[in-house]
Amino acid sequence: MVLITCLSNVAAQVGVGRIMGGSKFHYPVGQPELRPEEELQWRVSLLAKGLNALETPVRESTTF
């Protein structure tokens, strides 16, 4: 599992193995201020980073 959040310190405290920093509190996987095409590109990049994190073996909380 990969948790995408803007509260990575809280995720680490509760023992989440794979943590990814998100955008903002209300939009951790979006950036509504971008044009739709740019936001889509940003989201695809975020997903690719998340898949890479999912494939990475971890033993303790790790932030990607």
Image (spheres, rainbow, N blue to C red):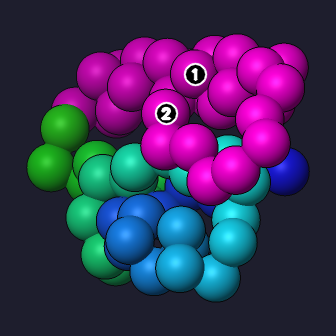
Q: Label 2, on which residue?
A: 64
Label 1 sits on what residue type? Lys
Are there few (<14), some (14-19), or many (20+) residues within 10 Å of tag 2? some
- Residue at position x 69%, y 27% from top? 53
Q: Nearer the viewer, mark 1 or mark 2?
A: 2
* Residue 23 vertical placement versus 46 (above, below): below
Mark number, residue 49? 1
Does the segment drawn in magenta span residue 45? yes
Image quarter of residue 58: top right
Does the segment drawn in magenta span residue 15? no
Asked whether residue 24 appears in the rendered view, the answer is yes
- In percent of width and height, residue 34 lies at 19, 38
Asked whether residue 40 appears in the rendered view, the answer is no
* Residue 15 vertical placement versus 55 (above, below): below
SS assignment at label 2: loop
Relative to the observer, which residue lies in front, 36 or 43?
Answer: 43
Whether the residues at callouts 1 and 2 have beta carbons within 8 Å, the answer is yes
* Residue 37 vertical placement versus 29 (above, below): above
- In percent of width and height, residue 48 lies at 63, 17
- In percent of width and height, residue 28 lies at 42, 61
Q: Which residues are magenta?
A: 35-64
Earlier sequence position, callout 1 versus callout 2: 1
- In percent of width and height, residue 54 lies at 80, 30
